[in-house]
Image (tube, coloured by chain):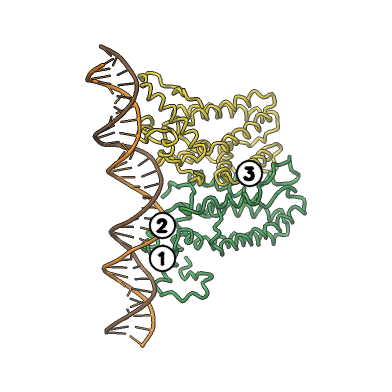
Chain colours: A green, B yellow, C brown, D orange
Amino acid sequence: MNPGAQPPDNPATQPLRSDAERNRGRIIAAGRTVFGRDGLNASMASVAREAGVGIATILRHFPAKEDLVAAVFLDRMEAYADAVAVALDDPDPWNGFTGYIEAACAMQAADYGFADVLTMTFPTAKALEKRRNEAYEAMVELINRAKATGRLREDFDPSDLVLIHMANAGVVNACGDAAPDAWRRVVALMIQSLEAPARGPLPASPEHDSLYKAMLRASPAGVTSPEPRKSS
Amino acid sequence: MNPGAQPPDNPATQPLRSDAERNRGRIIAAGRTVFGRDGLNASMASVAREAGVGIATILRHFPAKEDLVAAVFLDRMEAYADAVAVALDDPDPWNGFTGYIEAACAMQAADYGFADVLTMTFPTAKALEKRRNEAYEAMVELINRAKATGRLREDFDPSDLVLIHMANAGVVNACGDAAPDAWRRVVALMIQSLEAPARGPLPASPEHDSLYKAMLRASPAGVTSPEPRKSS
DNA sequence: TAACAATCGGATTGCCCTATCCGTTTTTGG
DNA sequence: CCAAAAACGGATAGGGCAATCCGATTGTTA
């Protein structure tokens, strides 16, 4: 899909040779397929096979695996950001808020790679992180509106969203294709716990810095860390 | 701790030579330390280093990594089962139930290896699975009592406990040492959502078979699969 | 269409893993 | 105290991975 695949911000770079451009598109499409199916731990070789190119070709376009991951998931991250925009348009902020959480978690369930991406951060992938931050800021606004209506508990913190994604990633990763809808039940429970009035106090949220460090924890080396998925 | 480490069921097996017996204990202790700190993906070599023995010595006592994992976590699993017994003793079943969930999740947070063990199953590790099943059955009783008091929502299913552990493992694994208490907040939310009256219906539980398959998914090959923890 | 540069892709390097092999050391029992 | 048996542990096999190298190929431009 999307074979013409323009690198969305490739400004001053001189135009690629036509075959190079074509391969770049194929590689990203292959990455989408393979990472979506097998998670971020899928090997570069498997992506190369799916794309029908050599390993070296991938690594010429994307010097490190992390670069490929960033390129592949940029448009997923945009869809993620769009989902917040949709939620903000909902006349009922609580409805928008819960719908957003469900949609975002569904995205994790539908794409094992993205499930991991949402719980990691890639400081070098500027475009990706820019989108994430946009989504986060819109989310803060959505949260405030939902609190204003009195339906969302007052002690909900935006960082809780990250925790929800971590929890959901845990369920999605552990269940894999064996119980592909199990996450829905967990997310439904989580959402019910967020509705005001709160049934009790909560332990304090983690420091924002701590959570950032946690999201950083995984990335560096093999890019990744996520569960080896048995599927492939 | 527990250096004398008697293999709890080593019946007809002829007695080991004294040094072998000693090493066996050292290896299990080292496994406890290393798996607890680095998760199940810690290498056999790192366990050997910690134990002060050669790699071969470990693999003679435990032919496959899975065997070592089973031996190391048997007593954690017993502590886990004990926690249900304690919960059953609580005169207030709801209190026992919530306390149990907190305790069990705390065990996951305190031992990264155990966090993974609780979301996997090891069919060949009889003693381990026996304990798990005992705990599960006691848990069913606890759940029924808690429902009978009217404090636990009627549609709670024992398998939800597995899902909670998967979610908690996700948080614990993602946060690691960077935000070591973040899981408490998520678990507190989950518990509040379990209190009756339910705030809404839930999607159906996954089939028991599916969940079992999901728990099986990880084990076979490198034993494991869990998150490569960056700590070591 | 020719010749040059850009691009390709398989083989290779280097690292880490589990598990096995085999010469050496330690324990045991007569 | 001295073998024979048991256990040890370093070296090695075998496999997977990301990333690099370099000879072969393909697109481009004149």
Badge 3 marks a residue whose secondary structure is helix
The amino acid marked with disc number 3 is Ala
- Identify the image quadrant of residue B137: top right
Label at residue A60: 1
Of label 1 and label 2, which has the lower sequence position?
2
From the viewer's perspective, tell me whether residue A205 is left or right of residue B37: right
Q: Residue A44 carries which label?
A: 2
Mark whose residue sits in front, 3 or 2: 3
Crowd band around label 1 with a 10 angstrom C-alpha radius: few (<14), some (14–19), many (20+): few
Left of B206 or right of it: where is A97?
right
- Name the residue carrying label 3: B182
Pointers 1 and 2 within a single chain: yes
Chain under callout 2: A
**Location of residue A158 in the rendering, given as x and y in whole percent from the top left corner:** 68, 52
Dot 2, crowdedness within 10 Å: few (<14), some or many (≥20)?
many
Q: x, y (%) of residue B23? A: 40, 27
Residue type for callout 2: Met
Residue drawn at 73 percent across, 59 percent down: A91
List x then y, in percent, for residue B120: 49, 38
Q: How far apart are marks 3 and 2 (CA)?
A: 33 Å
User: Are discs 1 and 2 less than 8 Å apart at CB?
Assistant: no
Q: Is mark 2 on a helix, strand or loop?
A: helix
